[in-house]
Image (cartoon, grey):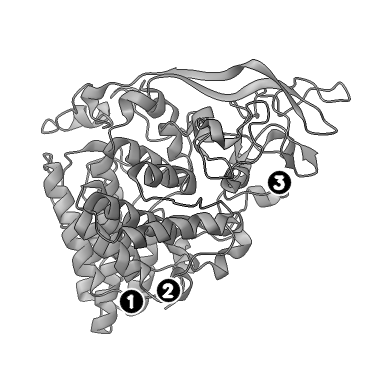
Amino acid sequence: MKPIKNLFIFFLVLLSACNKNALNVIPKNSLSDVIFWKTQEDANLALAGCYNSWETYMNICFLDAVSDNGYEQFDYGYQQKGNGQITPANFQQSSWPDKGACNWFTYSRIRKYNNFLTKIATVQMDANKKEVYKAEVRFLRAYDYFNKVMFFGDIPVVKELVTSDVKLKRNAAAEVQQFILDELTAISAILPVQNNIESGGHITKGAALALKARLELYLGKYTEAMQDSKAVIDMPVYQLYPNYRDLFLPENKLNNRESILEIEYLKDGYQNMLPQLSLPALDLGWSALSASKSMVDAYECSNGKLISDPASGYNPDKPFANRDPRLDMTIIYPGQFWNGRYYNSLDKLLPNGNKNPDYHEEAAASRGGQNVKKYVKPMSLQDMNNNDGNIMVIRLAEMYLTFAECAVATGQNTGLGLQYIQDLRTRAGQTNPPGMQLTMDLVRRERRVELAFEGLRFFDVKRWDLGPSVLPGPLYGSREGTVDPVSGQVTWAAGYIKLEDRQFNPVRNYLLPIPQSEMDSNPAMTQNPGY
């Protein structure tokens, strides 16, 4: 079976693009069944079309801007969602034309998947392989519904190819969730036990069980989530990558056995431009995503104590010294040695008197003075815009943390749950202090720092109902100050960079609004509370 990424281009002629109305589920521009849906090669090409834009790197790497972890300055679809200003009228799928960034409500992908599942029945090919192909597409459909139900709650469920113009009503969220779980259970019995390298980018049994464990955890089904996460952990095809920083760099994607599910990219064909969006201005980047003060404060000191603990040794005038190594590997902060210089987002001018492009008020500078380092490194402008680094959607570390949280919640296997967390900390070079205990506070903190800017923080805030305490009010970035360009020493001022004031409406229950365009076009549609 050819790797899916080599077949993406066929999608341009295979299936229709998005229609104006999100819930238009009728195929408008598919190839004629007379000339297609006959051979296995047809099925291969159609499967590649299903994988095209099933998810985008921005929805993973930028989603933390909808939480207390970060801030996205150009409003690529995340800023208004993060600050509580989103309404049905101003709801935008994305202002960034990047293959579906923030495009959670559209049903064009569901239409594409249902079309595949219907039409492949006529293809002459090996029966077992056909079932695997169908299982892969059923996974993509289940993943799409997972995002829909998480962001919108009650949503219409379309399980078959619709051939007449219908206005669909919303199904209860519990019904949608059960459909997802049932699908993942069924296809996990069909898909192969392989890691992402071995599968060539195809969906695997590990991916199905891992997504199932994620949803079960979010639903409080701790016994089931523990069982499914352990099944993935025990698969011999996965292992933690030895270096936390290198885990996310593009040159290591071919030896990364920690990845369970990822978005595959290919230079000169299906590339991404995450480095351009993330890198500092002096590196020709746009600094689109900033890490918040709250995110930085979440990292322990190197002795395993919180910065609020008087015994931690934390020095507010040397805030980045002696901290969890994952802080240094995740965030570019003032005074950090970076790409041959000390990063300086605090001073307006460079030593030569010229403007400092990295000063936090400049157009392409981090608004909070703290860039996100995950997945990026200094590179040429050409490579920034032609990046082939894959983006992990689910990795083994998440399964470790899922198991550990379930251990706390159930009181079962707590020793093993603690060991999994200690393994993650040891991999990163962080201390496991003597007498360390497995607690929910530890699990929550580890999820936040280990999985920072991987698109999971908002879901955690939602399921733990942390919104009232962590989302409203002012959002801050770095502390103000000045950076010595020779030594990197920062002389700190009293205040912090204020990014914005945020609102949180608990009546909305963390749900996004149904776009007004859909409300206008579908009289059967109802709006979410608080909008």
Looking at the image, is mark 3 or mark 2 earlier in the sequence?
Answer: 2
> What's the mark number on residue 381?
3
Q: Nearer the viewer, residue 99 or 348?
A: 348
The three-letter code of the residue at mark 2 reads Ser
- Residue drawn at the location 38% of the way across and 43% of the way down: 444
Quarter location, residue 212:
bottom left
Question: Is disc 2 in contact with disc 1, using a CB cutoff of under 8 Å?
Answer: yes
Cα separation between marks 3 and 1 = 39 Å
Location of the C terminus by quadrant is: top left
Q: Position of residue 202 (x, y in %)?
A: 39, 69
Q: Which residue matches tag 2?
A: 199
Determine the residue located farthest toward the bottom in the rendered image.
126
Give the left or right position of residue 390, taking residue 407 as reference: right
Q: Position of residue 250 (x, y in %)?
A: 60, 59
Q: Nearer the viewer, residue 73 or 394?
A: 394
- Residue drawn at the location 86% of the way across and 21% of the way down: 353
Crowd class of label 3 (few under 14; some 14 to 19; many from 20; radius 10 Å): some
Mark 3 or 2, which is nearer the eye? 2
User: Vertical placement of 332 versus 329: above or below?
Assistant: above
Q: Which residue matches tag 1?
A: 192
Q: Secondary structure at mark 1?
A: loop
